[in-house]
Amino acid sequence: MLDFDLSTQIGALRSTFADITAVIGVERLVKEISDLEKRASAPDLWDNAEEAQRVTSDLSHRQAELKRIRSVVERLDDLEVLVELAKAEDDEASAQEAQHELGEIEKVVSDLEIQTLLGGEYDPNPAVVTIRAGAGGVDAADFAEMLLRMYLRWSEQHGYSVRVLDTSYAEEAGIKSATFEVDEPYAFGKLSVEAGTHRLVRMSPFNSAGKRQTSFAAVEVVPLIEQAESIDIPENDIRIDVFRSSGPGGQSVNTTDSAVRITHLPTGIVVSCQNEKSQLQNRAAALRVLQSRLVLQMREEENAKKKELAGNITASWGDQMRSYVLAPYQMVKDLRTEYEVNNPQPVFDGDLDHFIQAGIRWRSLKNLEAQKA
């Protein structure tokens, strides 16, 4: 007779899930979806294309969140049936399937639990992420490209909508910088714990002597601000330059001057976009990112918390938040949370959830300690 029982684990998971849904507010979510559906069905919705896109995007995101919550209830019910079936038929294969499904549901519940810790003003917003090569020459440029791939893979594995806005390629290998947008609710709240200096230690493939090389890259994360929150930018305050998009090694990938670089003269903030099909699209995307950064800067100045969200990141020795070591041993370690793994390859392939979750819990604990102080 098969000795198999998951009732304790399933019961604990149901209890945790009930607490999570109480915090998220399922009734509120259902009401928001109903209101958005009414607005989306209005005959004059598309008279304002930007507003229409925002409404339909918000509706899609909330419907997906509600579907994920309801699917957990269904999967827990199905899991209990599967456990009973495995016990009744003494079926080892069904028992293994049930154990695997329990692990998968635990991952979803854990992700929902993390969402309840994201209570910051901008945490629910989509995110704009910029990666810049730091100290370390060619290795740093290559490392920056590795990080870009890592975050894009993480986003794709979660089914998040990702759009690369700008990529500046280095001469020999890798990238000088890249900016991409993750259009998903709570993308900023999750990815904001990734902001900081990342360090790579490895045997350099660009060093003929085969010596160990340390290189750095900076990750900046800012929230994508809603159009309603955006601020007007006087034309006299910006300089717009257009140029031809280019790929690795300067190879032309566009025969027209469609790439756009916007410089905000009062602050010196520079935003580029070259991956859209037309100059108008690139200009709109770059302006949206510039507005997000200006709104963020304005809020930071008001609260006297300079660089609180984006961070003052130098990408050099002394301020790294995570180390990726490939030689002489294998390890990825977050220096704030102490979370580490001994196999870097899955991390570079986008397996970041445990690092992000540990970072969010660490930040939440720090905020609680600061409130008590």
Image (cartoon, rainbow, N blue to C red):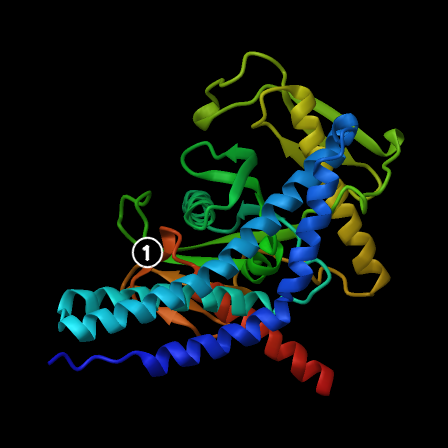
- The residue under the point 21% across, 79% down is 4
Image label count: 1
Q: Give the residue at mark 1.
A: 346
- Residue 190 screen position, x and y as percent: 56, 59
Q: Is residue 107 above or below residue 9?
A: above
Foreground pick, 167 / 216:
167
Q: Which residue appears farthest toward the left when viewing the image? A: 1
- Residue 180 screen position, x and y as percent: 56, 41
Tell me if I can see residue 16 in this picture.
yes
- The residue under the point 88% across, 30% down is 236
Element under label 1?
A: helix
Which quadrant does the N terminus fall into?
A: bottom left
Which quadrant does the C terminus fall into?
A: bottom right
Q: Quadrant of residue 369?
A: bottom right
Question: Dot 1, how many residues are within 10 Å of its Cα: few (below 14), some (14-19), or many (20+)?
Answer: few
Q: Which residue appears farthest toward the front when viewing the image? A: 88
- The residue under the point 65% across, 66% down is 25
Q: Amino acid at mark 1?
A: Pro
Give left or right: position of 165 versus 40: left
- Residue 61 screen position, x and y as percent: 59, 48
Tell me if I can see residue 332 in this picture.
no
- Residue 193 screen position, x and y as percent: 57, 63
- The residue under the point 73% across, 61% down is 121
Q: Which residue appears farthest toward the bottom when viewing the image? A: 373
Foreground pick, 165 / 135:
165
Q: Is residue 89 above or below residue 231?
A: below
Foreground pick, 201 / 91:
91
Give left or right: position of 66 versus 47: left
Q: Which residue appears farthest toward the top when viewing the image? A: 255
